[in-house]
Amino acid sequence: MYLALSAGTLSKGLVGLIIPGMVCSLYLLLTRKWSALSKLYLLPGALGCLALVVPWYLWAETRNPGYLRYYFWDEHFIRYLTDEFKRSKDWYYFSGVLALGFAPWTALLPFAAHRLWRNWDDGNLFLGLWVVLPMVFFSASKSQLPHYILPIFPALAILTGRTVAALFQKGMINGKRWLLYFPWAVTAAAIAGIAARAFWPALFSAGLQKKIPDGGFMLAGCGMALIVFHGVCIAANARGLWKDQRGMFTCSLVSATAFFLLLALWFETGSFRRSTKELARNLSPLIAPESQFATYDTYVTGLLFYLGLERPIWVVAQRGKAKSLGSPYVARFRPAPAPGYGKVFFTYEEFRKAWESEPRPVRLLLGANTVSRFNNTVGVRTKELLRADGYILATKP
C-alpha cells in the first residue's frame, strides 16, 4: 500500500495522498473503526514513503532550481484554485466523463446506485466514498481533465459487479435477464449513430457531425454486425430458447470482445488523424544531423519524438509567455539542457543575432499563420524549404 502511495505521489503529486487519505479518513470517521489504524503500520509506512519520495524531489530541485516551488505551489494550489491553466469546465463536466468512460456498463449504474442505497453496509459505504469524494473534489477544481477521475472506476466496477452477482445469488436473474442485455442495447444505439454518420452524413448537421466520431466504413460495418448479433441474442432470450445462463454469458462475452475491438479500431483511426508522425516524415529529409533545429512560437506535440533529434532544439519565444514547449515551468524558468549544449532559449532579439552568427545550418519551424509576426519581431531573411500541415520549414537564404 505504501509503495503505491509513493508511486502515486511521485507521478501525480499530493493528490496521490489526498484522494486515498480523505476516502479512508471519512470511512473511519463514519464507521468509528479506529482500531483499524493499528493494523496499518502508519509510522514505518510513512517513513518508507518519505524514503522513496524525498530523494527524487531533492534531486529534481538540484537539477532545476525553483522546481519545488513551481511544482507544489503552481501545479497544486494555483491549478486547483484558479483558472490560470485555462482548463476550467462546468460543475457537471465529470458526470459526462464518467458516463462515457464507464461505457457500456454505464447503463447499469442506476441499478447499482439503487442497490447501494438499500444495502448500506460497510463495504458499500467504502466503495461509495471511493466514487463520490474524488468526483466532488475534482468537480470543485478550476482545472479539470478527463483522466482526473480515473481512480473511481475500480470502485464503480466493483459496485456494478456486486449488483449483478447479488441477482444470481438470490435467484432473481431469470426475471431480470434484460439487465445484462441493457448495456449492449445502449452500445448498439451508439454504434448505430456512428454507422449512420458514415453511411448517411447528410442526415446530420455540420455541428452534430463534428460531435459524432467518424469511424469509417469498416468500423460502421463491424458495428452493424454487432447490432445484428445482439438482436439475435435478445430474440432467442425472448422466445425462451435459452433456458439457462449460457445464452446470456455468450452474448455478453461476444459483445464485450467486439466492443473493445471496435474501441481499439476507433482510437487507432483517431490517433492517426492527430499524430504528427506524417509531418515528421516530411521534415526529416530536410533536417541534416549537423543542423540546428529551432521553433518559433510553436509547439507541436510529439513532433520532436518522431524527428529523433540528438541535440536540444532552439526555442524562440518572447519572455513572459505563459507556456513554452507546452510547459509553464519551462516558460518561467527556462532550464538549461544537458551540459555542453549551450543556450537553447532565445528571445526574438537573441535569436536574430544567433541566426546571423550560427555557423551550422539552421532549420526553423514556424506556423504558416505566424509569418508576418515573425517578420515583425525577428526580421531576418529566410528561405522556405517546405510547407506542410499548416507549418513552414525555413532556413537561411
Image (cartoon, grey):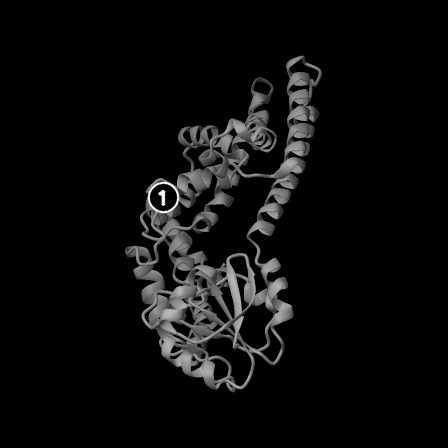
Quarter-wise, where is residue 74 in the image? bottom left
Residue that extends furthest to the left in the rendered view of this protein? 82
Residue that extends furthest to the top in the rendered view of this protein? 239
Q: Is residue 153 above or below residue 204?
A: below
Q: Nearer the viewer, residue 307 or 284?
A: 284
Q: Which secondary structure lies at badge 1?
A: helix
Q: Nearer the viewer, residue 199 or 220?
A: 199
Could you tell me the amino acid type at mark 1? Thr
Quarter-wise, where is residue 195 in the image? top right
Question: Residue shown at 51%/81% (left/top)?
Answer: 338
In the rendered structure, the answer to whether residue 118 lies left or right of residue 385 reads: left
**Can you give x and y, in whole percent of width and height, for residue 271 in the image?**
58, 50
**Can you give x and y, in whole percent of width and height, for residue 181 in the image?**
59, 25
Quarter-wise, where is residue 284 in the image? bottom right
In the rendered structure, the answer to whether residue 318 lies left or right of residue 186 reads: left
Few, some or many residues within 10 Å of mark 1 (<14, 14–19, 20+): few
Q: Is residue 269 above or below residue 225?
A: below
Q: Nearer the viewer, residue 198 or 20?
A: 198
Q: Is residue 187 above or below residue 243?
A: below
Question: Residue shown at 37%/56% (left/top)?
Answer: 18
**Can you give x and y, in whole percent of width and height, for residue 165 in the image?**
57, 31
Q: Is residue 123 visible?
A: no
Q: Is residue 16 visible?
A: yes
Q: Nearer the viewer, residue 164 or 223?
A: 223
Residue at the spot of label 1: 31
User: Number of labelled discs?
Assistant: 1
**Can you give x and y, in whole percent of width and height, for residue 382 in the image?**
49, 73
